[in-house]
Structure formats: structure tokens, C-alpha cells
Image (cartoon, rainbow, N blue to C red):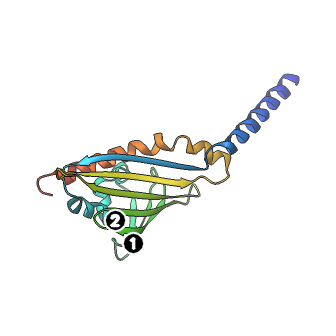
Amino acid sequence: MKIFMRIVGTLVGLAVVLALIGLLLPGRYRVERTAVIAAKPAAIFPLIGDLKAWPQWGVWFQRDPAMQVAYSPATSGVGAWSEWKSKSQGDGRMTITTVQAPALFEYRIEFPDMGMAATGTMVLVPGADGTTQVRMGMEGDLGRSPVNRWFGLFMDRMIGPDFDAGLSNLKKISEAPSH
């Protein structure tokens, strides 16, 4: 019985230490990736600015072809939204908050299952050589929860590869001769 109590005491102590450290971790996170695409911003922006175009290049849609997606009547412009339900990718909602075509696209993304929301951005910067630098970013508030703050330490490793893959898909589509 003494050994059991020591184990329980150690586990409780460890949980308290981890919770206290979690409270000291950053309360916000930011993930960003960049790609250079051999196309002008005006050629790329329609793939970003219209929510119905996202399944062409977004990796989440490719991972779950059975994903159920619903759209607002207008799928571009401030206030337009999409909602999805997916067994493998989770449920969510994305609402366009800012559009400055063909340079800036911002959105709010919500994940009700996790009780989290974030702000996403797509910035298109034209290059002198006809290319465009596309920056895809997401940032959010992790709140006061020590668990969420620990989770925040891994956001770059969790979301970053998806951004890289999505930008790679966007590059392929934008640079295709038929586009």
C-alpha cells in the first residue's frame, strides 16, 4: 500500500508541476509558411478568395473525400463561410473577415470540438520577376488552460506540414499551363 501511495503522490505532484509550467507557457501561437509561385497575384487569388476553390488545393479535403462541406450563398467576400464535418479531420467553420484582392485574404477558423478559434491569413506579395510570394499563416489565443498552452508548443509541427503541402498544391495548380 505504501508503494501505491508513493506512486499516486508522485503522479499528482507531476501533474501539478506540469500544470504550473503550462500556465507559464505562451498564451498565443503563430504558424507561418511561405512559397514562391511563378504566377501573378491576380492569377492565384481566385483560388484563395473563393471558398469553393479550397478543396482543389487544401490538404484537409484531400485527406477525407467523404468530408461534408456546406457553403454560404456567396462563397467569396467578407462574411462568406464554409462549414465541414469530417470523422478524420474534425468539424469546423471558416468565415472570411478581410479581402483586399489580390494581396490579402483573412479568415476566422473555429473548431467547436476543441473549443478553439484562430485567425488565418494569406498574403500575396508580387515579385519583380512575375512571381508571387504567398505567405500562409494562422495564429490564435490558447487561453488560460495549461493543457491548451502545452498543445500550443506543438502547433507549428502539427499545422506547418499541412500549410507546406497546401502551398505546394496551390503552386502546382497556379503554375499549370491551363491556369
Q: Position of residue 151 (x, y in %)?
A: 58, 44
Tell me which numbered mark, 1 or 2, is placed earlier along the sequence: 2
Number of numbered discs on residues = 2
Q: Is residue 5 above or below residue 141?
A: above
Say left or right for 85 vs 173: right
Residue at the image point whose x is 22% and y is 63% from the top: 42
User: Foreground: 7 or 99?
Assistant: 99
Q: Give the residue type that dot 2 points to.
A: Leu
Q: Position of residue 145 (x, y in %)?
A: 67, 50
* Residues under numbered marks 1 and 2 in contact, where contact means CB atoms less than 8 Å apart: yes
Q: Residue at x 82, y 31 (%)?
A: 9
Label 1 sits on residue = 80
Left or right, 24 with respect to 89, comes to right
**Nearest to the observer: residue 11 or residue 19:** 19
Q: Nearer the viewer, residue 55 or 67?
A: 55
Instruction: Please tell me in which quadrant of the rendered image residue 150 appears.
Output: top right
Query: On the rendered image, what quadrant is the C terminus found in?
Result: bottom left
On the image, the x and y values in percent for residue 69 come to 39, 64
Per the image, the residue denoted by label 2 is 51
